[in-house]
């Protein structure tokens, strides 16, 4: 019997649909500050290459600050285009990027109604996210998610990033529930689904309106128990 649901954050409760349009202008501002001239295609290709290189470097880490990840991508991006990632530029980018992400993330349209329904059903509700505290806390406060959540866990607080087992074990301890009593909902096959399945949780892979899940290294994935398109589809899963 499912007694609790652990949710991922980005791509799951929140959609990433606004992120590309919101963050791309930062790259052009950064290049201008660095005195680098590049075409649209050069910018796109350099950022993709920098991201892929950084994912390969970080995919073997059991824990890292996501600020460090995004900074590594940025520094690689600047250097690939012939620029120098100076400290002042790096500090400006990380601060601007964090504010941009927090401001552009928006709840999926059925998020609040689903959380309300789950709460009425007496389901234990939690967020287990690979995110830094300075992103997670502002989002929860802004959208008043605390009204529905029993707890929320960031990778920074636990010093563990999914799929590492420590972050899942920490959430289970807080919930005082067994893994087989938990349904984990996330958009990342290799972070959410693989990590939760390994501990014995049942899993739901949710799609984000065609947006690909971020930070995927291409390692072997685990097949989820269920795949859904909308958060409201969860209600059918737990009712079955």
Image: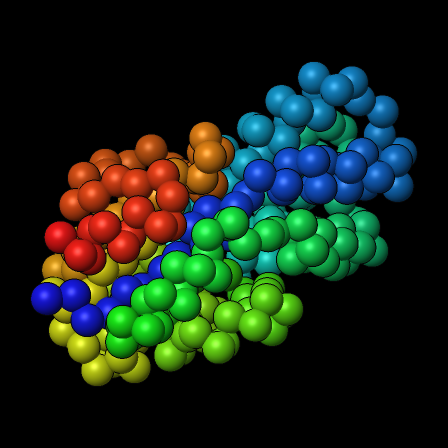
Residue at 33 percent across and 33 percent down: it is: 218
Q: Is residue 183 above or below residue 18?
A: below
> Residue 178 placed where, x, y %?
14, 73
From the viewer's perspective, is residue 213 above or below residue 198? above
Q: Nearer the viewer, residue 188 or 113?
A: 113
Residue shown at 55% from the left, 43% from the top? 16
Q: Residue 73, relative to residue 101: is it above or below?
A: above
Q: Is 109 situated above or below 160?
A: above
The residue under the point 80% across, 34% down is 28
Q: Quadrant of residue 129?
A: bottom left
Residue at position x 46%, y 52% from top?
110
187 relative position to 33: left or right: left
Q: Residue 141's image quarter?
A: bottom right
Q: Nearer the viewer, residue 183 or 119?
A: 119
- Provide residue 21's location: percent of width, then percent of height: 69, 36
Q: Is residue 102 left or right of residue 209?
A: right
Q: Position of residue 156 (x, y in %)?
A: 48, 69
Query: Which of these two is toward me, 57 or 21?
Result: 21
Asked if residue 159 shows in the view, the reply is no
Q: Quadrant of the N terminus?
A: bottom left
């Amino acid at each position: 019997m499912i007694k609790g649901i652990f949710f991922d954050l980005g791509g799951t409760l929140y959609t990433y649909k606004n992120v590309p349009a919101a963050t791309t202008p930062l790259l052009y501002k950064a290049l201008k500050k660095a005195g680098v001239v590049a075409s649209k295609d050069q910018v796109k290709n350099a950022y993709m290459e920098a991201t892929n290189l950084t994912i390969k470097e970080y995919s073997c880490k059991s824990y890292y600050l996501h600020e460090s990840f995004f900074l590594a991508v940025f520094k690689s991006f600047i250097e690939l285009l012939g620029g120098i990632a100076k400290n002042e530029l790096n500090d400006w980018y990380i601060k601007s990027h964090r504010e941009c992400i927090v401001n552009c993330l928006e709840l999926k349209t059925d998020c609040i109604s689903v959380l309300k329904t789950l709460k009425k059903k007496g389901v234990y509700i939690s967020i287990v996210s690979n995110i830094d505290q300075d992103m997670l806390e502002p989002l929860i406060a802004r959208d008043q998610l605390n009204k529905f959540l029993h707890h929320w866990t960031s990778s920074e607080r636990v010093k563990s990033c999914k799929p590492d087992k420590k972050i899942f074990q920490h959430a289970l301890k807080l919930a005082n529930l067994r893994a087989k009593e938990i349904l984990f909902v996330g958009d990342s096959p290799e972070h959410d689904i693989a990590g939760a399945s390994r501990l014995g949780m049942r899993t739901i892979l949710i799609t984000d309106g065609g947006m690909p899940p971020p930070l995927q290294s291409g390692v072997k994935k685990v097949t989820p128990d269920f795949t859904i398109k909308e958060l409201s589809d969860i209600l059918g899963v737990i009712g079955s």
